Amino acid sequence: MKREQFIKSLGLITLSGMSANSFLAACSSKQTTEAPGVSDTDTPKELFFKISLAEWSLHKALFAKEFDNLEFPAKAKNEFGIGAVEYVNQFFMDKAKDTAYLTELKKRADDLGVTNVLIMCDGEGEMADLDAKKRMKAVENHYKWVDAAKFLGCHSIRVNCFGIGTAEEVAGAGADGLRKLSEYAQPANINVIVENHGGYSSNGQWLSDVMKEVNMPNCGTLPDFGNFCVKREKGDMWESKCIEEYDRYQGVSEMMSFAKGVSAKSVNFNEQGDCTDTDYGRMLAIVKEGGYTGHIGIEYEGSTLSEPEGIKATKALLERVGMMLS
């Protein structure tokens, strides 16, 4: 089950400074993982970004109850060597106000030295609903996740900007909903960030314009390397065939000036360890050019590799290509 299908069941660059050819050659998987100009005797470079693990990468195991949300920080640290996590509210939907549960979750993360980065929030209503009352209800439904994020030490909650209407109507409603939620979150020092997650929100220019309209320092974007379907065959949000995609490199580039998080979506890999859906060399160059140095969350959604294998493949790819840019 894809995350988008589960949400529905709930009711819901260009490169600069070098030629593309020369950069892609440098990032070829056949090249050494050693950064140019760095010898074995030099101090190793650090990546220009930090790596986190999005909980959705393990959604199959979570739905199968092979482990639960409380065990997620330990799994990230002990199995994958990742010291930062991005939660998904679907896996502790009834615990947002459960202080004892949140205390235990925070303790487990703290004991392991794991950083709680953000909470991805779905199934709480349409933030860009054209009906003002329904939109406000969706805003209020997210209050508890702002509070939970603050308690856990996260810096953000990820929300969706969905609504039914014209692009202009939904943008206006979305800006209103996001502004109201951001006003609530501001005193708690929590960011409200929007992912390109289907429909209008997968149009980078549209989402950037919404951010400009909100015009609040704690409202931003979570550019995802995938999720750029703007039109589907049957007009529904998730399940039918995608018939129109926004250019992913252009979209991420347009969103980077508002980015407070980045999601490294991966689905398929070739034998050389490269993601065949997204050119990670080109995409990470866009991220770096945007001045971003925060966490990039691994979000594996493939089926050819197992979830653990996909996570490890994505981490290795981020490290290899990221080192060449750092």
Image (cartoon, grey):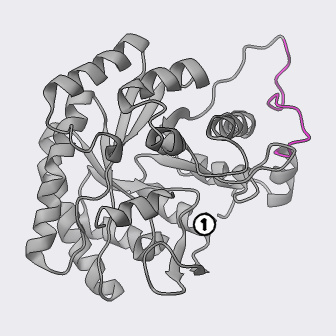
* Residue 7 in the image, given as x and y percentages of width and height: 37, 61
* Residue 230 in the image, given as x and y percentages of width and height: 50, 78
Q: Determine the main secondary structure of the stretch shown in magenta.
A: loop
The residue that appears at 43% across and 28% down in the rendered structure is 72
Which span of residues is magenta-colored?
A: 27-40
Residue ranking furthest to the left: 133
Can residue 144 be seen by looking at this rendering? yes
Secondary structure at numbered mark 1 = helix
The residue identified by callout 1 is 248
Q: Is residue 211 left or right of residue 80?
A: left
Image quadrant in which you'd find residue 139: bottom left
The residue that appears at 22% across and 65% down in the rendered structure is 125
Image quadrant in which you'd find residue 12: bottom left
Residue 37 is covered by the magenta coloring: yes
Q: Is residue 223 left or right of residue 167?
A: right
Residue ranking furthest to the right: 30
* Frontmost residue, 134 versus 95: 95
Residue 34 is covered by the magenta coloring: yes
- Disc 1 marks a residue whose amino acid type is Arg
Does residue 181 lie above or below 212 as drawn?
above
* Frontmost residue, 279 versus 244: 244
The residue that appears at 36% across and 72% down in the rendered structure is 209
Label 1 packing within 10 angstroms: few (<14), some (14-19), many (20+): many
